[in-house]
Amino acid sequence: MLGKSLRAVADNMELAAIMGINMKRVSLTVWILASLFAGAGGFLLALDTNLEPMMGMTNMIKAFAAVLLGGAGNVWGALLGGLFIGIAENIGVAFFSPGYKDFISFALIFLLLILKPKGIFGVLAGVR
């Protein structure tokens, strides 16, 4: 029942509320499931690597670079930005030392903020 409710809410929130779907329950359930999955992912990552307070900082900066590259507010742009960063890092490792892999992400952020601050697929404010 949750799956159909979730699909209805994702398709049209107002129509789902009119049809009697409890929006608070669906929203709370989705937040709980997302939190559980994120917690499980963090726990499994902690088991795979050494647990330390800043263990996800590099991944977070790379995700931030992907969002900047694709344009904030554009999910497909962020997806393509992440793909571009992954390809750029691996090509960079082929030409340079593997120690420069993280530097490539930082360099892409720096260049993108200077050359194209709205991202590759970014939209102008107020224009869709």
Image (cartoon, helix red, strand yellow):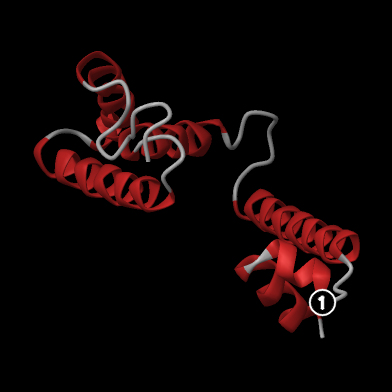
Front residue (pair 87, 12): 12
- Left or right: residue 116 compared with residue 127: left
Front residue (pair 87, 99): 87
Tell me the kind of residue under disc 1.
Met
- Which residue sits at x=79%, y=60%? 36
In the displayed orientation, state which residue is furthest to the bottom.
1
Q: Secondary structure at mark 1?
A: loop
- Which residue sits at x=86%, y=58%? 28
Q: Which residue is mark 1?
A: 19
Q: Is residue 24 above or below residue 89?
A: below
- Left or right: residue 61 compared with residue 97: right
Quarter the C terminus occupies: top left
- Which residue sits at x=29%, y=35%? 101
Residue 85 image offset from top left, x and y in percent: 28, 42
Residue 114 image offset from top left, x and y in percent: 24, 13
- Left or right: residue 58 compared with residue 114: right
Front residue (pair 23, 67): 23
Residue 27 image offset from top left, x and y in percent: 81, 59
In the displayed orientation, state which residue is furthest to the top.
114
Q: Is residue 84 above or below residue 124?
A: below
